[in-house]
């Protein structure tokens, strides 16, 4: 498989009143052509910041990519000048955001908004662009696209707006689509529609998707590979099956066991105690150590290295060291198939 | 289900809450909803945004005046004119936990004053020493400690704030708590903390909950019975296991099948009922059954007649013509 | 990697005892809201400069007249229109503090004024000491401005608060009244007001307040409407809080921020308005002076005796700029969106 996008040891910091917030601390992962990778994590884990760093959408004044490379087809996006980035944004890599209410311009017809990118990146004539816009709306399942293209965002419902946003993102046939919590603001029945649409579109267009979410259900539904983030680092990566059926990191265990399961007997949920670390003063060792039921002395002072479990599966945890005691994941973390 | 012998704590009868949008339009947020809540149970209320579940909760606790219908708490009507004393008594019995942990605590007050608000209003402490002790005790109940008492809300994380909100509600020793989407703004691992706390408190204090949420799996986990709302109507109400295993109403079926399950194997093989279209506007809802515009089983009668709220099986209520002998002659 | 490998010993793989209490620990020092605001304000250099300038001017407004030996209304027709002369600085000629007017005549010598007599900012056409008059004028201007701001505050907050809190019909009627008042050009109201009452500190203040409170009331009403639906207000209501408690404990403390910002902006507005009234002859009447009146007088002889207009103008500019800087700084410091 071809590596389309590769992040190598990326560090991102924000400068605030209180000091430097190290939001992303050494993140490395890659994205292959046409695959869908989910980045899972809680708020403040650095998942959104990572995706914004790829798009270079972080505020210039208060944040910086301190270290590392973001390689897209051999080019390092982290060092690319703004002019070069403009050619990539929207054309090669595009992004959809959480809230469809605010990611559309309320004073422009949706047709114009779709055509904007087409005319800028692909030098299409007005009629060509319009035709393409209508096709795109058809593609994302909006009925009567010829009429609706002249309408304004407020005339669309939430689910329809997210479809429009997806149409805009796909307008220039990007190679990578970054979806930042694309269904969080939507109701379950609408979420099902959108997830269905995204899976369908990926089959049709072959776009690689980076899905950023906190919802493990959405991950299981859409992703092929998963990266679990915590405290600004990736704690575990693997294929969906590896993450759900053979998780190795206690944080992944915790996440899986704190979700109630529809088919399971009603018993107490295994909650992860405490709160995520403050990235203003990140812990010296493993970021999860303070909340980890299996924490050892070594976890407090040494950051665990990423350890290979299989060719596709890696976890950063000292429990995988041969000197560590053997620990079994809690029963609640076992998802259906593992039993 | 042994619900029949249990004592009713709260009876909601034909509750309606309409909001005037302008001179002509009326938004029927809650339209003719009836259900009972038994002592010591948790009733879950689910539905998508705009279905009226939060309005129902707020109307029950008198934050809104009901347009019509009544709410009986231990047999006494909650609404209508009341003396200040009666109101205060009622306020102590019924409490509420809110959704947004950031907006539900006054940013200018210390945690101690926030939690002690109920104590102050109802004069439950004789002096400031007793007041402090009560506050510390409550903080410990929700897993915080007295070092937190003099801090301000913005210093806490979302989960901690939500627990402060719970402590505030507990300060007046209520019997019944309405939890209005108490976990939807929290992270997964923190959600479990709050849900576990709520369940622990229920066990220790014999509380009764009305748990409002849109996360169906969490509702199933915490509730004994679950009601499903759609566009201001209650469409189905049943014991939580029964509802999830054998949903009767087409909307409930679609809703359950739409939840993504955190299990890739299941997700791959799953057949989904994907509902077409969007939620109609509650200002101008469809005639007859409100779900008929998106219902895969809609019949002619659905447009003409409002479905009756009836007990299809013991303890399993549903409002759908498919389960009405009178209309469902075609079988199904 | 090899470096860390060496340091790791087997005993480090023993389970670490975690204190469960630590999970809830908050390491940051506890700051009240106002401490936090002050901390942020302190970092804003412009706002602090403004604050220092205002404090200095306020001090001078009270101390200034006392350290000069001349009274503010003490006339001396033999000593009119003297240019400024300051001991020490008189030797540095280009500063213009040597008693020489713009035509190059040493007025102090021409008018036979004893060597030890200094008029720091010169004298006006009636021979009154300009230094004393400027600080006296600053006093009056500030007094009017603070009174006007206080008036805005009292009327605006009460009116906006009632309108927003009770809402419905009450709000409807109160807002229609405001709209009518706002529809009349306020200059007309003010001029009529001052023509009916004698111009003086109180009548000028009232004239400014009579329309000035509207802006404040709108701000407060908007804020109250926004707060009213917030969950902490609902929570307090479900606990059985009375209206009085809601207002005093929840609504007022949360509107305080914007009220303070609005006040720091309305003070320079009032100073400016008073100056404007003086300019059109409806301001403070002599011999009392305000900054506006002084500028207005000096303006008439700007080309012959520029010092008469320049010094009061400088003081007024510093005042206005400083208040605006503080207002800006406070707005940034109080903005809850920047809280982190």
Image (tube, helix red, strand yellow):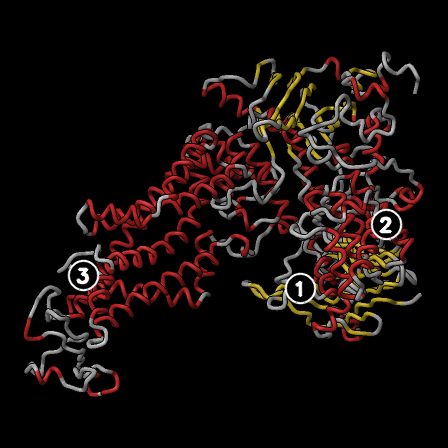
> What residue sits 69% from the left and 21% below the top?
B33
**Rendering quarter of residue C311:** bottom left
Q: Is residue B329 left or right of residue B24?
A: right
* Image position of A124 with respect to A181: above or below: below
The reply to whether label 2 and label 1 mark residues of one chain is: yes
Image quarter (top left, top right, bottom left or bottom right) of the C terminus of chain B:
top right
Left or right of C228? Residue B176 is right
Q: Which of marks 1 and 3 is in front?
A: 3
Of all residues shown, which one is farthest toward the front? Answer: A127
Q: Looking at the picture, how far across and down is residue A175, in whole percent?
A: 85, 63
Tell me the residue at 73%/68% (across/down). Answer: A86
| Mark 3 chain | C
Q: What element carries label 3?
A: loop
Badge 2 local density, few (<14 within 10 Å), some, or many (20+)? some
Using residue B152 as the reference point, say whether residue C277 is left or right of it. Answer: left
| SS assignment at label 1 | loop
Give residue A173's position: percent from left, percent from top.
84, 60
**Residue C289's disc number:** 3
**Could you say which disc has been placed on residue A58 in the image?**
1
């Amino acid at each position: 498989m071809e590596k389309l996008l590769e992040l190598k040891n990326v560090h991102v910091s924000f400068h605030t009143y209180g000091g430097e917030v190290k939001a992303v601390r050494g993140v490395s992962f890659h994205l292959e052509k046409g695959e869908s990778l989910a980045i899972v994590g809680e708020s403040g884990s650095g998942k959104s910041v990572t995706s914004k760093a790829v798009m270079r959408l972080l505020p210039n004044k208060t944040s910086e990519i301190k270290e590392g490379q973001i390689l897209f087809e051999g080019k390092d996006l982290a060092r690319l000048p703004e002019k070069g980035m403009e050619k990539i944004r929207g054309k090669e890599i595009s992004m959809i955001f959480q809230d469809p209410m605010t990611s559309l311009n309320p004073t422009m017809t949706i047709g114009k908004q779709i055509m904007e990118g087409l005319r800028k990146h692909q030098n299409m004539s007005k009629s060509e662009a319009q035709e393409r816009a209508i096709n795109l709306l058809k593609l994302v399942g909006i009925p009567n696209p010829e009429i609706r293209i002249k309408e304004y965002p407020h005339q669309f419902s939430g689910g329809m707006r997210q479809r429009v946003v997806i149409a805009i993102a796909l307008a220039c046939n990007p190679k990578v689509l970054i979806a930042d919590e694309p269904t969080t603001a939507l109701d379950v029945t609408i979420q099902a529609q959108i997830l269905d649409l995204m899976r369908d579109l990926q089959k049709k267009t072959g776009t690689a998707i980076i899905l950023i979410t906190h919802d493990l259900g959405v991950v299981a539904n859409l992703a092929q590979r998963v990266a679990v983030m915590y405290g600004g680092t990736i704690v575990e990566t693997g294929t969906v099956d590896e993450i759900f059926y053979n998780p190795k990191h206690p944080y992944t265990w915790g996440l899986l066991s704190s979700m109630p399961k529809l088919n399971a007997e009603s018993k107490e949920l295994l909650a992860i105690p405490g709160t995520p670390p403050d990235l203003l003063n990140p812990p010296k060792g493993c970021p999860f150590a303070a909340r980890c039921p299996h924490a050892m002395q070594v976890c407090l002072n040494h950051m665990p290295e990423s350890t290979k479990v299989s060719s596709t599966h890696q976890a950063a945890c000292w429990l995988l060291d041969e000197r560590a005691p053997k620990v079994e994941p809690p029963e609640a973390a076992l998802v259906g198939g593992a039993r | 289900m042994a619900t029949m012998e249990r004592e009713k704590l709260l009876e909601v009868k034909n509750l309606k809450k309409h909001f005037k949008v302008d001179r002509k339009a009326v938004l029927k947020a809650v339209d003719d909803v009836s259900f009972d809540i038994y002592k010591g149970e948790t009733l879950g209320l689910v539905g998508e945004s705009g279905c009226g579940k939060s309005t129902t909760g707020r109307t029950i606790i008198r934050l809104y005046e009901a347009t019509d219908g009544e709410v009986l708490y231990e047999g006494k009507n909650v609404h209508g004119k009341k003396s200040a004393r009666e109101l205060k008594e009622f306020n102590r019995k019924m409490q509420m936990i809110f959704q947004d942990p950031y907006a539900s605590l006054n940013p200018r007050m210390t945690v101690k004053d926030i939690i002690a608000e109920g104590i102050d209003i109802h004069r439950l402490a004789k002096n400031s020493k007793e007041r402090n002790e009560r506050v510390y005790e409550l903080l410990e109940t929700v897993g915080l400690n007295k070092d937190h008492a003099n801090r301000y809300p913005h210093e806490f994380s979302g989960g901690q704030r939500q627990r402060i909100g719970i402590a505030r509600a507990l300060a007046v020793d209520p019997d019944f708590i309405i939890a209005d989407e108490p976990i939807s703004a929290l992270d997964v691992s923190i959600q479990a903390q709050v849900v576990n706390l709520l369940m622990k408190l229920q066990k220790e204090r014999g509380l009764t909950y009305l748990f409002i949420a849109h996360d169906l799996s969490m509702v199933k986990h915490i509730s004994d019975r679950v009601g499903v709302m759609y566009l201001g109507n209650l469409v189905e109400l049943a014991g939580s296991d029964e509802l999830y295993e054998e949903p009767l109403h087409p909307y409930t079926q679609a809703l359950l099948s739409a939840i993504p399950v955190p299990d890739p194997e299941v997700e791959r093989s799953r057949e989904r009922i994907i509902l077409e279209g969007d939620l109609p506007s509650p200002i101008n809802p469809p005639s007859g059954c409100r779900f008929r515009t998106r219902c895969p089983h809609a019949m002619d009668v659905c447009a003409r007649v409002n479905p009756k709220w009836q007990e299809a099986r013991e303890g399993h209520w549903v409002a759908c013509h498919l389960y009405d002998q009178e209309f469902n002659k075609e079988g199904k | 990697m090899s470096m860390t490998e060496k340091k790791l010993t087997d005993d480090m793989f023993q389970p670490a005892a975690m204190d469960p209490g630590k999970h809830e620990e908050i390491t940051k020092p506890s700051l009240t809201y106002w401490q936090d605001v002050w901390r942020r304000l302190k970092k804003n250099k412009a706002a602090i400069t403004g604050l220092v300038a205002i404090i200095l001017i306020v001090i001078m407004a009270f101390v200034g007249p006392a350290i000069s030996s001349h009274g503010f209304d003490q006339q001396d027709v033999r000593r009119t229109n003297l240019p400024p002369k300051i001991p020490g600085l008189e030797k540095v000629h280009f500063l213009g503090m040597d008693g020489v007017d713009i035509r190059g005549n040493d007025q102090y010598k021409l008018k036979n004024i004893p060597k030890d007599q200094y008029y720091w900012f010169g004298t006006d056409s009636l021979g009154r000491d300009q230094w004393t008059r400027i600080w006296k004028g600053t006093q009056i201007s500030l007094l009017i401005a603070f009174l006007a701001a206080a008036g805005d505050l009292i009327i605006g907050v009460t009116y906006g608060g009632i309108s927003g809190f009770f809402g419905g019909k009450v709000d409807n009627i109160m807002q229609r009244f405001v709209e009518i008042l706002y529809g009349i050009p306020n200059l007309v109201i003010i001029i009529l007001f001052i023509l009916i009452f004698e111009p003086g500190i109180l009548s000028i203040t009232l004239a400014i307040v009579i329309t000035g409170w509207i802006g404040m009331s709108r701000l407060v009403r908007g804020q109250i409407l926004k707060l009213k639906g917030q969950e902490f207000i609902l929570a307090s209501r479900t606990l059985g809080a009375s209206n009085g408690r809601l207002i005093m404990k929840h609504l007022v403390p949360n509107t305080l921020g914007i009220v303070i910002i609005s006040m720091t902006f309305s003070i320079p507005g009032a100073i400016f308005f008073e100056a404007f009234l003086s300019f059109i002859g409806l301001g403070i009447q002599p011999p009392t002076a305000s900054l506006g009146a002084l500028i207005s007088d000096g303006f008439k002889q700007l080309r012959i005796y520029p010092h008469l207009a320049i010094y009061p103008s400088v003081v007024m500019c510093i005042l206005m700029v400083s208040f605006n800087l503080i207002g800006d700084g406070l707005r940034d410091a109080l903005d809850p969106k920047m809280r982190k």
